[in-house]
Amino acid sequence: MQTLQDVIKQGNAFPDPRGSSATMYYSQMYINGKMYNIEVLYDEATNTVYNFEYARIDIEGDIDGIYR
């Protein structure tokens, strides 16, 4: 849960790509020294996390590649 809270507090916020009132937060995290993208769909009004996922493959380059 702490990881999701960190992404919500410090990640880059964008409107939900599917049009809900929730916000999609994007960030990066490290697991065993490897960088992964993580995204969290969070609705502050209801304090609900609707979805979260992280890329299980190593990423190369800038996080801009995950912005939609």
Image (spheres, grey):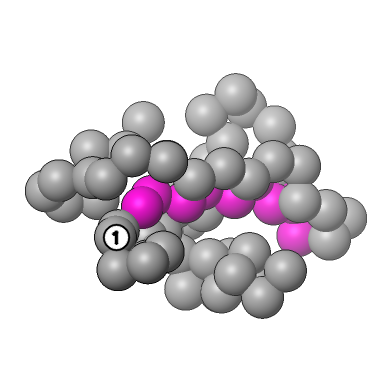
Residue 32 location, x and y as percent?
37, 67
Residue 5 location, x and y as percent?
65, 71
Observer-nearest of 16 and 30: 30
Total marks placed:
1
Give me the residue at 57% from left, 43% from top.
53
22 on left or right of 33: right
Q: Which residues are magenta?
A: 36-45
Observer-nearest of 25 and 36: 36
Give me the residue at 11% from left, 48% from top.
61
48 on left or right of 34: right
User: Main structural element of the magenta stretch: helix, strand or loop?
Assistant: strand
Residue 66 location, x and y as percent?
32, 38
Residue 19 location, x and y as percent?
62, 27
- What residue sits right under mark 1 in the picture? 34
Residue pushed farthest right?
46
Residue pushed farthest top?
18
User: Looking at the picture, does residue 2 appear above or below residue 38?
Assistant: below
Rendering quarter of residue 51: top right
Give me the residue at 53% from left, 66% from top.
7
Residue pushed farthest left?
61
Whether residue 63 appears in magenta in the rendering, the answer is no
Q: Quadrant of the C terminus?
A: top left
* Residue 38 appears in view: yes
